[in-house]
Image (cartoon, rainbow, N blue to C red):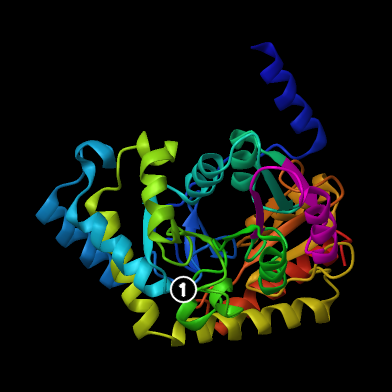
Amino acid sequence: MAHLRAVLDDLRERGTYFKLRVLDDEQGPLCHYDGREVINLASNNYLGLCEHPKLVEAAIAATKKYGVGSGAVRTIAGTMRIHVELEEKIAAFKGVEACVVFQSGFTANAGTVSSILGKEDFILSDELNHASIIDGARLSRAKIKVFRHKDVAHCEELLKEVRNEPGRKLVITDGVFSMDGDIGPVAALCDLCDKYGAIMMVDDAHASGVLGRNGRGSVDHFHCTQRVDVQVGTLSKAIGCLGGYVCGSRDLIDYLYHRARPFLFSTSHPPSVAASCMAAFDILESEPERMERLWANTKYFQAQLQGTGFDIGGKSTPKSETPITPIILGDGRKTMDYSRALFEEGVMATGIAFPTVPEGKARIRCIMTSEHTRAQIDQALETMTSVAKGMGLV
């Protein structure tokens, strides 16, 4: 096992080695990591639902009624009524026939792609799609074709190449790309799938709660609900809890019940999680002002960063179109040093370097939430600017 130490030593030499920071309280806009009070710009808690009282109340009530665990996988004895109710609520929210909930967004993607395709099939995947899509594609043993980021014309070239080959063709894109914050060309890719008879799949993890009517995601944003065959979403970002889900036809969901390995071989969610998720979807419908605050904060934050001279995409990387706001620094060591310096000054903004992003594309990834106050945003901006100037980054 000595090679593990060698890899870690190399990370230290590059300056990209990190230690996990430990959260001491709620996942809020102002919280404590490693005992230090910081303005939190690193969380996926877009709408502040992680600490919403209604979700907490729902979790407590469900725990008292159903206990703390389900005791089995879904296909044996672990499908509780509350799991079925959650899936029905999500399906109704998304406007589709059916839904299945997985243990995480990662397993939802990987389990679905790997189960619906085989070695005679083809996958056409955006080059910046999430790692869970990449892993699922590899597990499927299908032939993988990667098209340039958001390049619909290139995707069509690849579809033309394989149109007469036997097997199914699946086109996959993120709805919102997690590192750059840009929006996938969902409608244009749907047009290609219609033209070439391909299956259309969208991972809406970072679009759920952010885009579309009341946060229904990029598929709804582009009015493509009836054109996307497989919709994947997460329950652990804007929804504030834990898990992932797949939406689509009744046949798709029944098939996943029988063939998706993460579903078949993992214990189902604790009832408290299912109850909190249902409460979150109720809040998406009843409190649209959360999304309004999220977007107002995002536009203000990004405008101020650009005015200061930070590269937040659009030069060497795609331009952000959502609350995910990268500050592109390029060099991995400088990026991680900047992140650590910000933390020391009271701003939690995580550095991301290779292999999560390509070499030369290291960045600080910031995420706005609906719950950040203008005072907190201004304080964070002041700190980020002063530290960057002191390090010669702007």
In this rendering, does residue 244 appear at all? no
Q: Is residue 78 above or below residue 126?
A: above
Image quarter hosting the N terminus: top right
Q: Across the whole image, how many numbered discs are drawn on residues?
A: 1
Secondary element at image label 1: loop
- Give 289 or 27, whichever is nearer the viewer: 289
Q: Which residues are magenta?
A: 144-173
Residue 172 vs residue 5, the one in the foreground: 172
The answer to whether one can see residue 106 in this image is yes
In reply to whether residue 160 is colored magenta, the answer given is yes
Q: What percent of the width, then of the height, locates residue 219?
A: 56, 72
237, 224: nearer the viewer: 224
Disc 1: which residue: 47
> 305 or 224: which is nearer to us?
224
Q: Residue at x 48, y 61 (%)?
A: 237
* Identity of the residue drawn at 69% across and 44% down: 122
Please check the rendered image and state whether residue 281 is part of the magenta-colored stretch, yes or no.
no
Point out residue 328 in the picture as x, y percentages from the top left corner: 81, 61
On the image, the x and y values in percent for residue 4 come to 67, 19
Q: Where on the picture, by quarter, is residue 121?
A: top right
Direction from residue 384 to residue 104 in the image, left or right:
left
Residue sitting at x 25%, y 57%: 84
Q: Where in the figure is residue 132, as x and y percent of width and height?
A: 59, 45
